[in-house]
Image (tube, helix red, strand yellow):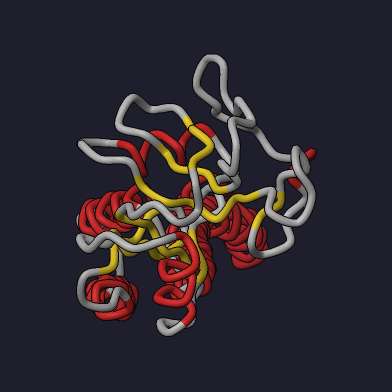
Amino acid sequence: MELDNYQNLNNFQPDRQREDRGKHEAVKPEHGVRSAEPVRGKQSSLVIYILLGLSILLSVVILGTAVILFTGSSEKTRSSLAELRTDISQLKEVPGMSEEIRSSLAELRTEISQLKEKTRSQCPNQWSLFNQKLYYFSTSKKTWNEAQESCKSMDANLVVINSAEEQEYLQQGKLDSLWIGLNDRVEEGKWRWVDGTDYASTVTFWASGQPNQNGDEDCAVASETHGWHDWPCSSRHSFICEKSP
């Protein structure tokens, strides 16, 4: 009788062990459930890395912009700065961004504002900034030589025109002929720019029938009709000076 009870007890224990093992297995999380939290962690880390990358990219843009600004800038550059500040503001609203990154973006916006102020201060009084060059539009009338000397006294030269955009900018709203830095006084018909720029390699904007080589017309003006004319260097005109910032 006792032997039968002992055998029954042995038979019962494996069944209980199997039951206990089943309970443990039921409690044990499935593989998918266990890995869900690390996956979410990886996704959060990825977002942070992307945002940090964007911050670094923006820093590079700011540095590049600073170089442009300190060597002169155009209206397009200043417009791009304004757009960049707007983009940064929008980027700050990205969900899940850390306070550290938000703070960095705020500092970048501040730096852009400071750079814009420095750009304004780069332009001296009565000078205009266009396409990385400074221009002075004289209201007094002088001979070509006097005009060039006036420009030199301001560390500049009479303007050298290198593009259609520059020509258009210089002529906008002008109602008078203006001396430019072009003459053929050394050799008739051989035109030279005052800064040594190769005349043959630049675009020209002579009016129809100009230059006409009439007498002593050895200096050039940009006329109110948006074309160049050769003119006696001793005549008196307003003038345009040009220099780098």
Q: Residue furthest top?
A: 208
Q: Residue at x 22, y 53 (%)?
A: 86
Q: Quadrant of residue 95?
A: bottom left
Q: Quadrant of residue 2?
A: bottom right
Q: Nearer the viewer, residue 39 or 105?
A: 105
Quarter of the figure with the C terminus = bottom left
Q: Is residue 22 visible?
A: yes
Q: Nearer the viewer, residue 81 or 221?
A: 221
Q: Nearer the viewer, residue 26 or 58?
A: 58
Q: Residue at x 63, y 50 (%)?
A: 183
**Is 136 left, or right, of 42 in this rendering?**
left
**Is 135 left, or right, of 26 in this rendering?**
left
- Position in image of residue 156 (x %, y %): 48, 74
- Position in image of residue 80 (x %, y %): 35, 51
Q: Residue at x 59, y 61 (%)?
A: 13
Q: Residue at x 24, y 73 (%)?
A: 120
- Position in image of residue 14 (x %, y %): 64, 57
Quarter of the figure with the N terminus = bottom right
Q: Nearer the viewer, residue 99 or 11?
A: 99
- Position in image of residue 98 (x %, y %): 30, 72
Q: Is residue 52 visible?
A: no
Q: Is residue 181 above or below residue 230?
A: below
